Amino acid sequence: MERQMFFRLVLALMLPVAGCKMEQAGPAPDYGSGCIVVDDFETYTADSPMKIFETWIDGFGYTEPPPGKPGNVSGATVGYLDKPFLERTIVHGGSQSMPFRYKNTVLPFYSEIERQWAVPQDWATSGTRVLGLWVYGDPCNVPGPLYVALQDASGATSVVNHPDPNAVCAGCWNKWSIELSKFVGIHPVAVSKICIGVGDRRGLGRSVGGEGMLFIDDIELSRR
C-alpha cells in the first residue's frame, strides 16, 4: 500500500517546470536514420510473460508465474503496483515509458534495475558508437548519481555516471548520450546486461541517500 500511494502522489506532482517542454504521447520515434532500438517499452503488457518487471529486474524480483526470479536486493522498484504497470501519460515516444522508483535510505543505499539477454548483443553493429536513453525526473526528487552499467559475456562490468549530479531532478525529458568507448574494459560486441541505477554502485552504497521517481524511455544505439 505504501508503494502504491507513493507512485500516485509522485505522478500527481510530476508536472512540467518552467523552461521545460512536456512531450506528449505520439508516434514511436523514427529509427530509419541508423538508430537501433534497445528498448522503447512499447511491447510490454499487463500479462505474463510481457510484464515490465519480468524483463527489467528490480530489487524485489517476482514470484508469479513460477518459478519467478529473485530481485537484486537494491532499493529499486520497476513499474506501478497496479496494471498496466507502465506509465502512459509521461512518455517520450510512443505510448508507454518505464517507471523507476529509487529508495536509497536503507541498505544497500543504491537502486538498480537490470535487463539481461540470454544471447549477448552486438552493440557495435553498423558502426554504432553511442548509447542513448531519455530520462524524466522530478524537482522533488532527492539528488543522487544516475548511472548506466554494461556487462559483457565474460562478466566484465563498466559503469558510467551522468555528468550532471542533479540529473534525476530535471522535470522534463532529457536525452543522455553515452559514447560506448566510455564503458572501459567491456566488449561492445557481446553485451549481456544493461543496468540503470541511482546511487553509489561502485562504492557498494557506503552512504545513505534519498529517494524519488524517474521515467525511462527510448533506449537506443546510434552512430553519433
Image (cartoon, rainbow, N blue to C red):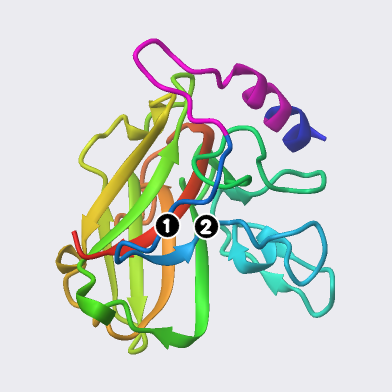
User: In what quadrant of the picture does the N terminus appear?
Assistant: top right
Residue 71 is at least partly visible in this image: yes
Residue 152 position in % (x across, y down)? 34, 81
Q: Residue furthest top?
A: 18
The residue at 42%/86% (across/down) is: 120
Residue 211 position in % (x across, y down)? 51, 33
Badge 1: few (under 14), some or many (20 or more) residues near its Cα, within 10 Å? some
Where residue 199 sits, quadrant-wise, is top left
Where residue 3 sits, quadrant-wise, is top right
Residue 145 is at least partly visible in this image: no
Q: Which residue is mark 1?
A: 219
| Disc 1/disc 2 C-alpha distance (Å) | 6 Å
Judge by depth and name the residue closer to the eye, 56 or 220: 220
- Report the amino acid beneath label 1: Ile
Judge by depth and name the residue closer to the eye, 13 or 62: 13
Which dot marks residue 40?
Answer: 2
The residue at 67%/70% (across/down) is: 70
Q: Are marks 1 and 2 in contact (CB under 8 Å)?
A: yes
Q: Is residue 160 magenta?
A: no
Q: How many marks?
A: 2
Range of magenta residues: 7-24
Q: Is residue 21 magenta?
A: yes
Left or right of residue 122, residue 115 in this image: right
The residue at 74%/65% (across/down) is: 62
